[in-house]
Amino acid sequence: DTAVSQTPKYLVTQMGNDKSIKCEQNLGHDTMYWYKQDSKKFLKIMFSYNNKELIINETVPNRFSPKSPDKAHLNLHINSLELGDSAVYFCASSQDTAHEQFFGPGTRLTVL
Amino acid sequence: AQSVAQPEDQVNVAEGNPLTVKCTYSVSGNPYLFWYVQYPNRGLQFLLKYITGDNLVKGSYGFEAEFNKSQTSFHLKKPSALVSDSALYFCAVRDRSGTYKYIFGTGTRLKVLA
């Protein structure tokens, strides 16, 4: 069983579209994260939820909006996609805010 | 402000030789420190962490790391490198305050040559 899963694995779309990426963890963890990894492999945290409460909200465009319907899910919705949004987006979870994180396989987003 | 530095973009080592991947950090107080590995087209995998206690931490796949408070370093080591260790390695730090924020280093590509 996959511990942290993301869908879709690949997402190719046109500029201006709206898209969502879904993340689910079956580890019973309290904390979930979204990261963006650019083409140079730099990893930047975007958001984090702990027990469904937003605790990290980094400086990202407000076109990006996270939603956590329950502790096991953290989705990322992106409005009005731009070329610069092309990247690999990783979801992760951890037991709490101090423990190691378990990463999903990533979603490669390509904006044309 | 918190920061993590991985000074080497790439480290090359011959199979069977010891390897070191360097990490230094800047954070107020005592940090939580982590190492992760990323294989091509995969998510990051946790290797080891330092929370408290013994400065030498042992982790997965024979890796270890030493927390050095005076030098603010947390270098990753392995006594004998394998070709299969070739991957991208990330150091990460989190302070113990209430900011919850993890900072990842820029990554070091390890290449083990047969």
Image (spheres, rainbow, N blue to C red):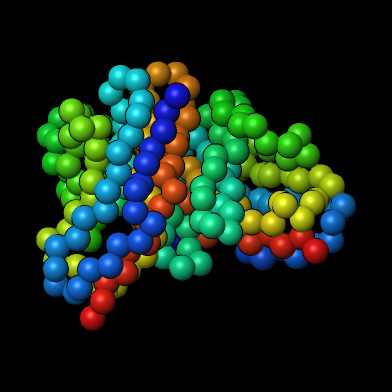
Answer with left or right where residue B57 lies relative to residue A72.
left
Q: Which residue is pictured at 17% across the width and 42% down the height?
A: B66
Task: Please identify the quarter of the rendering in which residue A110 is found.
Answer: bottom right
Judge from the rendering whether residue B28 lies leftward or rightward of residue A41; answer left or right: left
Q: Residue at x 66, y 51 (%)?
A: A22
Nearest the eye: B22 or B40: B22
The furthest residue to the bottom:
B114
**Could one spot residue B77 in this view of the protein?**
yes
In-image side of A102 versus B110 (left or right): right
Residue at x-position 76% and y-position 60%: A111
As displayed, is residue B104 above or below residue B69? below
The percent position of residue A79, horizontal first and vertical second, equals 81, 45
Q: Nearer the viewer, residue A103 or B32?
A: B32
- Residue at the image position 24 percent from the left and 41 percent from the top: B74
Q: Is residue A73 left or right of residue B87?
A: right
- Position in image of residue B92 (x %, y %): 38, 41
Residue A65 vs B69, above or below: the answer is below
**Is residue B91 placed above or below A107 in the rendered structure?**
above
Given residues A17 and B28, the one toward you in this image is B28
The C terminus of chain A appears in which quarter of the rendering?
Answer: bottom right
Q: Residue furthest right?
A: A16
Q: Position of residue B99 (x, y in %)?
A: 47, 22
Residue A33 pos. (x, y %): 54, 40
Residue B34, quarter of picture: top left
Res A25 visible: no
**How many circles with numbers are drawn on the protein?**
0
- Looking at the picture, does residue A32 appear above or below residue A50? below
